[in-house]
Amino acid sequence: MSVSAARERLAEAVELYGRAAAVMISPSRYEELMTALEDVEDIAAFDDAMAEEGPNVPWEQVKADLGWQ
């Protein structure tokens, strides 16, 4: 659907088969949501890593390896 057609028929542009098919938000809010999603994905990856079996590296060693001490 072209932008001009969407302007004329906005309700149809965001609805498909009687269900919401799109949402409209500001670009800044979209960026905020994408950043939050990335943060959640990072937390999930961390949780997965923590749940892995195998040898663990002590936190003090990690900090030393990273030069944080």
Image: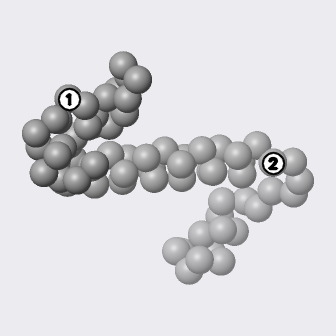
Q: How far across and how far down the image is residue 66, in percent?
A: 59, 77
Residue 11: mark: 1
Q: How far across and how far down the image is residue 15, in percent?
A: 31, 29
Q: Residue at x 28, y 49 (%)?
A: 1
Give me the C-alpha separation between circle 2 and circle 1: 48 Å
Q: Residue at x 66, y 59 (%)?
A: 59
Q: How far across and how far down the image is residue 45, in percent?
A: 63, 51
Choose between 9 and 42: the one closer to the eye. 9
| Above or below, 6 relative to 35 | above
Q: Secondary structure at mark 1?
A: helix
Direction from residue 52 to residue 36 in the image, left or right: left
Direction from residue 41 to residue 46 in the image, left or right: right
| Three-letter code, disc 2 | Glu
Q: Residue at x 10, y 39 (%)?
A: 8
Q: How far across and how far down the image is residue 24, in percent?
A: 22, 40
Dot 2 or dot 1, earlier in sequence:
1
Residue 39: mark: none
Q: Secondary structure at mark 2?
A: loop
Direction from residue 33 to residue 52 in the image, left or right: right
Residue 14's quadrant in the figure? top left
Color encoding of the figure = one colour
Identify residue for label 2.
52
Direction from residue 26 to residue 17 in the image, left or right: right
